[in-house]
Amino acid sequence: MLSDRPRNLCYQKAIQRNAEHLKDKVVLDVGSGSGILSLMCAKYGNPKKRPARLRATIRLRPRARATCRLRPTMSSDVLDSSNVRIRNVYAVEASDMAEKTEGVVRDNGFEDIICVKRSYIEDAHLDDEVDLIISEWMGTILLFEMMIESVIIARDKFLKSEGVMWPSRASLYLVPCMAHDKHRDLVQFWDNQYSFDFSSLKGPASSEFFEKPYHNYVLQREQCLAMETELFSLDLHTVIIEDLEKIAQQFEFQITKDGQLHGFCTWFQTDFKGLGSGVKMTILNTGPDHDLTHWKQNLFMLDTPLDVKSKDRLEGVATLTRHPEWRRHLRFRLKFDHITNETNQTESYDKEFLVWR
């Protein structure tokens, strides 16, 4: 993640644009990982600088938690501002990465600003309500791994009524596309290998390859057979966990050029609202017209390519469903009609993809 420059610079830009409005604010970084977002908030923002509660003794750190440690007060200490520890950013991380993050925070001189807590957000305890929740929770097809659930829980537990979520909105986009390269690599591959015919394996291999998305795909704009459409958009200030169990959305595309429809691609956009009037919104878009991120695009391939012509229509419903048992996993179903422009003939298609179980 640290090597994803467009992603990191977008978060940094949002913080820098809003630095004036971050003054005297308390920030919560959910799933802080390496701590990069917390470090950015501490360096480029001006969050609230408040004295933490002084403790007379060092609290031993339990293995299941990484706590904010204060040195013991000695008899010679005077209770003035020089002995008060300042905390304005909470970095909450459930994994043992939290302990490593504490070291990174110390190495960068922000131990008096950033409080690292090893905890699931459900179990976390903070001394404050927070003004801003920042997190990088997005995954394959936006929602895979469902880290958004932790962000929603954090919002409901800790965010002030007038507080702000970053990202503030997240939207998923869908486009029909050609993918000759991937189809050739996965299907035509079997026709001739070292002068031998392996085509009998093509069917089983295709079923295995195409039942899941290709999550590391780089889509070029010229492969798109129509303009993308927004499938859904989530307002992080109001969305609830129950909203994520099943999301169904109708779509309609008018094909803009002749070609072979190999499947559909998805990508997402997240918006970071300005904290004050006149502050420009910051946008992270993972689509083909923008700088490539580690998310790239997600390719959902049909079992058999479909010949399409300009002005043909694709009309259908995309349904994203949360797995009832493996709660971090999803099902993505594309059910659509291909309506030819020349003859108005209709053919129906229906395919469900596993993301990933």
Image (cartoon, rainbow, N blue to C red):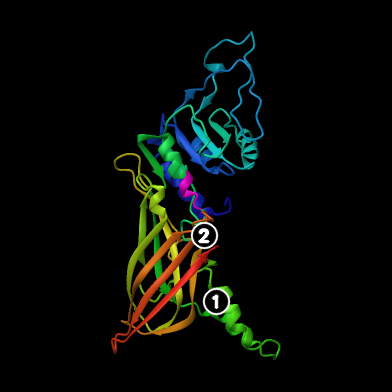
Q: Is mark 2 on a helix, strand or loop?
A: loop
Report the magenta stretch's main SS: helix
Can you give x and y, in whole percent of width and height, for residue 33 in the image? 58, 44
Which residue is under mark 1? Answer: 182
Quick one: which residue is furthest to the front in this view? 325
Nearer the observer, 17 or 267: 267
The quarter of the picture where residue 4 lies is bottom right
Look at the image and give the residue range highlighted in magenta: 146-150
Work out whether mark 1 precedes mark 2 in sequence or the reverse, and give the earlier one: 1
Can you give x and y, in whole percent of width and height, for residue 138 in the image? 48, 53
Can you give x and y, in whole percent of width and height, for residue 57 in the image? 63, 17
Q: Is-magenta flag for residue 149? A: yes
Q: Looking at the picture, which amino acid does disc 1 mark?
A: Lys
Q: Which residue is drawn at 57% across and 78% down?
A: 206
Q: Residues within 10 Å of mark 1 (few under 14, many from 20)?
A: some
Q: Is residue 219 visible?
A: no
As displayed, is residue 125 above or below residue 249? above
Q: How crowded is mark 2: few (under 14 residues within 10 Å), some or many (20 or more)?
A: many
Which residue is under mark 2? Answer: 295
Q: Is mark 1 on a helix, strand or loop?
A: helix
Q: Residue at x 29, y 40 (%)?
A: 277
Q: Is-magenta flag for residue 126? A: no
As displayed, is residue 262 above or below residue 91? below
Q: Looking at the picture, which amino acid does disc 2 mark?
A: Trp
Kindly check if marks 1 and 2 are in contact, taking CB atoms under 8 A apart as contact: no
As displayed, is residue 68 above or below residue 175? above
